[in-house]
Image: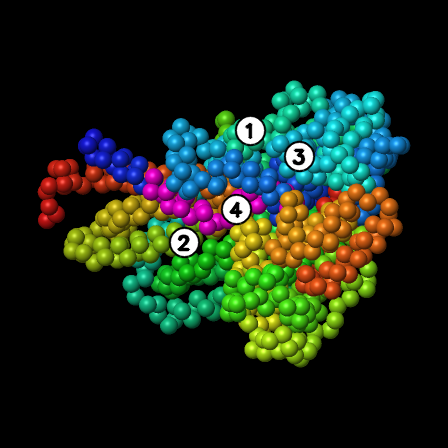
Amino acid sequence: MKIQRFAGLAALLASTLMASSAMAETLRWARASDALTLDPHSQNQGVTHNFAHHIYETLVDRAVDGSLTPRLATEWYVKEGEPSVWVFKLRHDVKFHDGADFTAEDVVFSLDRARSEHSNMRQLHSAIESVTAVDDHTVEVKMTGPSPLYPNNLTNTFVMDKGWSEAHNLQSVQDYAAGEDNYAVRNANGTGPYILDSREVDVRSVLKRNEAHWAETKPQVTEIIYLPIAENATRIAALLSGEVDLVQDVPVQDIERLKGTAGLKVETGPENRIIYFGYRMDDKPLKSSNVTDKNPIADPRVREAMHLAVDREAIRRVVMRGNSLPAGVAMPPFVHGWTPELDAFPAPDPERAKALLAEAGYPDGFSVTLDTPNNRYVNDEAISQAVVSMLGRIGIKVTLASRPVAQHSPLITGDNTDFYLLGWGVPTFDSAYIFNDLIHSRTGHFGAYNPSGYADPALDAKIESLATEVDVEKRDADVAEIWAQVQRDRVLLPIHNQLLAYAMKENVTLAVHPENQPLMTTVTYGQ
Amino acid sequence: MFAFILRRLLQSLIVMLAVAFIAFLMFRFVGDPVEGMMGVDARLSDREALRDRLGLNDPFYMQFWTFVKNAVQGEFGISYRLQQPVTQLILSRLPATLELAVVSASLALIVGVTLGVFTAIHGRLPPSTRETLLALGAVLGAGVAFHLLGGGSLLWTLGGGAAVFVSTAFWAKRFFSQAIMAVSLVGVSLPTFLIGIGLIFVFAVEMKLLPSFGRGQTVQVWSGWSTGFLTKSGLLSLILPAVTLSLFQMTLIMRLVRAEMQEVLRSDYIRFARARGLPESKINFRHALKNTLVPVITITGLQLGSIIAFAIITETVFNWPGVGSLFVNSVQAVDVPVMAAYLLFVALVFVVINLIVDLLYYLVDPRLRVDGRAGRT
């Protein structure tokens, strides 16, 4: 009797829970972390941009295939006779959430703000000399030199309203050191498809559909409830119990289980991010090796041996449980310059690798320390562990040093590593982005993530020329040549491209976005 | 008296300074905050400039000094991760933590003392074979009956079994008290994380009775204090985290009460009371329980501090928006201002509770009042 009542109460509660989730137009969207800020120019970070794309809009947008598509700008071109000036034609009849008109002045203000001193977006706009409004719907951006690829840098630079910003004293971006609290961090006024309704940092944010948005088709989702849930197990439990509709960050080990759960489905797709190993390959002895008079990795035969020792298929099968695309080149397939030939990789051949090591003068191998992050990429530490044992088979004794990313990254930017794992996303979808930071020798603004010591002035010059080369065919040929040399010299040891997985209720459909920045405007309901 | 309090306050200040100092020593090994504050393609020169402006390149004693100087003025800076004033962040998260702590502590105290008394009174002898068999039989019988009647999932069966078990237990008290002691070992030894995930799995995922995460709907009571006590979803959300957080304290208090009470029950005045023919309930609750409560109050007071300060794991598992989960997120992002302020806050909580406990001793124990000169007898 007592128990029956209990069961009855439970059924009642369960049915009220289900009734509230049956309202199809509200989407409860769970992620591992919250957007860091609402200020669109303050952080150059994926999660923050992903959230901002719902409230604010950019001049140009990027389609899933990597091509640029119009958003607030309807067309853009290099000005006739002035190769270093870009002209942007703006969309008419666009209004900000507070009702103000969107005009060229807002674009000028936003670009100037994005390249101001405390902005984290400024490196994307460092080639700008000046921005001017020609008329209400035309903006001219004057660059310091020809910049054929500049519009690629605009896909995460959002437009704010000049009047609103000036009223709230937002001309500059948050300055941490000054200890001030910027109004834009907690308030938003964009032109985007959703309007911020309420926000509790790290807890929940509610967005309501912008009924006055310019797009012809209205998104099906009328209300977004954004829920950051840091703990993996809790996030998945919330989906299983029906308390959220969509989980964007699904741990690899849960994918199969969720696929087999009635009422749920999992969408997977490749992410625009390559996971690779890098090493010091100049002549100075390694810091962590038993070979103290020279650098074994400087010998091309040793690098070839390491390349042959790694079994990418085994990593895909065992470590990633099938959820990766093994790669032969340090470049995701979305990137301009990618070819299937470059991406091919040899079958692992430990015998040949051992022979190469012996030939190079290391019949008994050598020792080295591998630095790996343990909280940045999917199964990053496990990948490194697998590679440690694979290299062990050919006699290279690897000691694993595993750290959180906040401690790992400084090793690479500060030249304090011999051998490391890193992941690289390519937001511009162009090879130059990889060359600039990973291949170019560390000089000036180049080579920030290149602690390899690899330096070839001719190659550096070729990389630098890519930024200003206007002849498309010549540029493509240069890109191919650079990749050929990088592959020949084995500058990087690529492993795979990560797959992304989104889990959702059966009646919700959202395709995986290669940059992991899905827009909830693309969510559809029903079968 | 005033000299005593003054001395204690001075000591408290030194403790807090020491905590802050050690915290700053450790921050150098947590990683580079600038890494998380700037995108991957930020220029090295820009990173260096930011590091300089934030004073991260200063030697740690300089950073420490700046921190102390600002902290004295109540200024804890801007969070590197969330770009909001740290004081405001911590204050906005405090209600969630305090409400959870108060509910957990009350739960632990009420259930712990009740079960402690129960097991002390009834647990002196091991249960007879007949009682054990009866209890086990009842559980199994009920379980099988439920299952045969098609009473739903295995979990409901187990739930039914547990309910029958409770009713049987009142009949076979000695068996029950032994069973409680055995189960309490689970509370003491299972990690909080596992208990939390287990409860989520049973009550949220399988039964869909209670929310698995968050605080539900909250209501703004007065400026800055949002409470979950006033809404249905708020109260439902509180159950699982409160049980998880209180389980350890609950078993601790229960075992403490039981041990103290058994000690008291053996003493002469209890035997004498029994010889006088006083009713059992009067002996147990008026004479025995009253004399066991002094150490219990001390322990409970100190445990309240650790419930507030170390709800971190429970808060993380249940995505409870308190100061503990704020701290965890801050550690991952190397958010030094938040970490420093949080550690100082925790030190303050302990210092204040210790001070109160010391003052209570002072009031309770007359021997302490004579300037500490009188020795114990």
What's the chain of the residue with tag 3? Answer: A
Residue type, numbered disc 3: His
Residue B214: image quadrant is: top right
Residue type, numbered disc 1: Asp
- Magenta residue check for A39: no
Measured in 3D between alpha carbons, the distance from the residue under mark 4 to the one under mark 1, in whole angstroms, is: 22 Å
x and y, in percent, of residue A262 in the image: 72, 58
Q: Earlier in the sequence, mark 3 or mark 1?
A: 3
Q: Residue at x 50, y 55 (%)?
A: B193
* Marks 3 & 2, CB-CB < 8 Å contact: no
Residue B168: image quadrant is: bottom left
Residue type, numbered disc 4: Asp
User: Relative to B117, is A73 above or below?
Assistant: above
- Residue A5 in view here: no
As drawn, the label of residue B248 is 2
Question: Magenta part mainly helix, strand or loop?
Answer: helix
